[in-house]
Image (tube, rainbow, N blue to C red):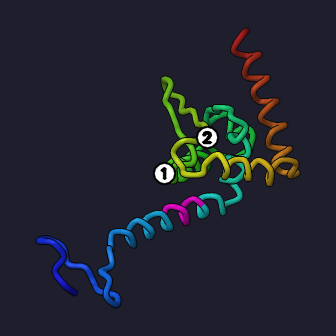
């Protein structure tokens, strides 16, 4: 190592000083990318993403009805997706609403387009979307009565 400027030590590779911060940026990017793919490696989270990727904002109860899963399971998976940056949430009264977060992830639009292409037409996704549509229709009808 040699002194570079007054404050920083940089390792030498041949006759060149190596800027370690460049490696830190690469490491951080790779770690974030791995977290995204880990989030998408779970079937339940993929089913949730398939419901949201169309651009629709959904309440937790809507997702529960479509997937036929308990609130605790759905909320846990949504929390994982939110922490990864794949979805955004907002509170309205006691209800939590979720939507795809296209802006928070680099290449997010490309990733979501790929998810749409891969998941559309899948038997489970078609069934989940059918159940969601029926739930939303019943919910709207009951809200108006």
The quadrant holding residue 52 is: top right
The residues colored magenta run 32-36
The furthest residue to the left: 6
Q: Are marks 1 and 2 in contact (CB under 8 Å)?
A: no
Question: Cα distance, mark 1 to mark 2?
Answer: 13 Å
Residue located beneath label 2 in the image: 100
- Report the front residue among 50 and 22: 22
Which mark is first along the chain, 2 or 1?
Answer: 1
Q: Furthest residue to the bottom?
A: 14
Q: Which quadrant is the N terminus positioned in?
A: bottom left
21 or 93: which is nearer to us? 21
**Element carrying mark 1:** helix
Q: Can you identify the residue that label 1 sits on? A: 83
- Residue at 19% over, 85% down: 2
Q: Residue at x 57, y 48 (%)?
A: 86
Res 76 seen here: no
Residue 137 visible to an observer of this rendering: yes
Q: Is residue 34 magenta?
A: yes
Image spot of residue 116 (x, y percent): 76, 47
In front: mark 1 or mark 2?
2
Picture quarter containing residue 95? top right
| Location of residue 66 with respect to 107 vertically, above or below | above
Packing grade of label 2 (10 A; few <14, some 14-19, many >=20) is many
Closer to us: 131 or 83:
83
53 over 23 or under it: above or below = above
Residue 136 pos. (x, y %): 75, 26
Element class at badge 2: strand
The percent position of residue 90, horizontal first and vertical second, equals 50, 32
Residue found 84% across the figure and 37% down from its top: 130
Q: Residue furthest front?
A: 15
């Amino acid at each position: 190592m040699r002194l570079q400027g007054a404050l920083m030590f940089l390792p030498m590779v041949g006759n060149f000083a190596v800027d370690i911060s460049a490696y830190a940026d690469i490491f951080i990017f790779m770690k974030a990318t791995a977290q995204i793919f880990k989030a998408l490696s779970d079937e339940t989270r993929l089913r949730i993403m398939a419901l949201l990727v169309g651009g629709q904002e959904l309440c937790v109860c809507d997702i529960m009805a479509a997937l036929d899963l308990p609130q605790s399971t759905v909320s846990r998976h949504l929390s994982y997706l939110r922490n990864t940056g794949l979805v955004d949430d907002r509170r309205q009264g006691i209800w939590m609403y979720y939507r795809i977060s296209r802006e928070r992830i680099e290449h997010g639009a490309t990733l979501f387009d790929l998810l749409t292409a891969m998941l559309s037409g899948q038997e489970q996704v078609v069934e989940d979307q059918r159940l969601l549509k029926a739930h939303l229709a019943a919910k709207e009808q009951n809200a108006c009565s």
